[in-house]
Image (cartoon, rainbow, N blue to C red):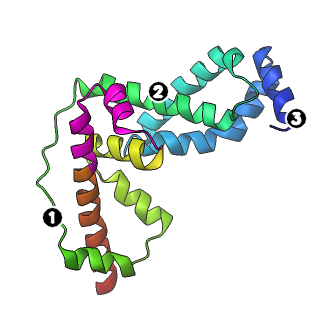
Amino acid sequence: MEAADINLIEACKKGEPRAQREVYARFSPMMFAVALRYTNNARTDAEDILQESWIKVFRHIKSFSEHNSFEGWLRRIVVNTAITHYRRNQKHAFQLDVDEVYATPADLEAFKELDFTREELASAIAQLPKGYGMVFNMYVIEGFKHKEIAEQLGIDLNTSKSQLSRARKYLQGILNNMSKRATKA
């Protein structure tokens, strides 16, 4: 970390509002994007997650060590807050039952030739059912292991693996439909 960043974090540890505003302004857009991935683009849920995360950040900033990545520390707080949010809301949500989507070898071959923009991929991921999207984001984007995902979400290890497998198949279907629409246009 640069000396200026260390000084800024030290000022936050002392509770200085100017430093807190600067840290918030610098990292909020990036952390909002992380929260948004875990809410399937539900902006209000992502805003709630981000707000809860910043409260946790400033409440526990004294525990941050300058030897670690501040951005990584923030990201972990946002991801854990999103997981808590998901688990809290899962009690009241209906399970979405999705029919299996099977990819044929021809589908897989077609994907090798297609290029999708970052926005198109984000849009496709956002269309995943909540459970699929949560596991997909945690495993593929954040790099969690299935055991960690199972523990965090309170699900069985094999459920995590099957949710990821189904998410990938579902995502292939979405991307296949996007590419078909693009070739018709």
Report crowding for label 2: few under 14, some 14 to 19, many 20 or more residues within 10 A (C-alpha): many
Against 61, residue 155 (above or below) is below
* 3D distance between C-alphas at marks 2 and 3: 28 Å
- Identify the residue at the far bottom of this view: 184
User: What span is colored magenta in the figure?
Assistant: 143-164
Q: Position of residue 34 (x, y in %)?
A: 51, 42
Contact (CB < 8 A) between labels 1 and 2? Answer: no
Q: Is residue 161 magenta?
A: yes
Task: Please check the rendered image and state whether residue 85 is part of the magenta-colored stretch, yes or no.
Answer: no
Compared to 128, does 90 lie above or below?
A: above
- Identify the residue position indicated by label 1 in the image: 102
Name the amino acid, label 1: Tyr
Image quadrant holding the N terminus, namely top right
Give the mark nearer the N terminus: 1 vs 2: 2
Residue 52 visible in image? yes
**Amino acid identity at mark 3:** Ala
Quadrant of the snapshot with the C terminus: bottom left
Determine whether, in the image, residue 12 is placed left or right of residue 115.
Answer: right
Q: What amino acid is found at the position of numbered circle 2 in the picture?
A: Thr
Element on which disc 2 rests: helix
To which residue does mark 2 refer?
81
Q: Nearer the viewer, residue 28 or 135?
A: 135
**Viewer-nearest residue: 99 or 157:** 157
Number of callouts in the render? Answer: 3
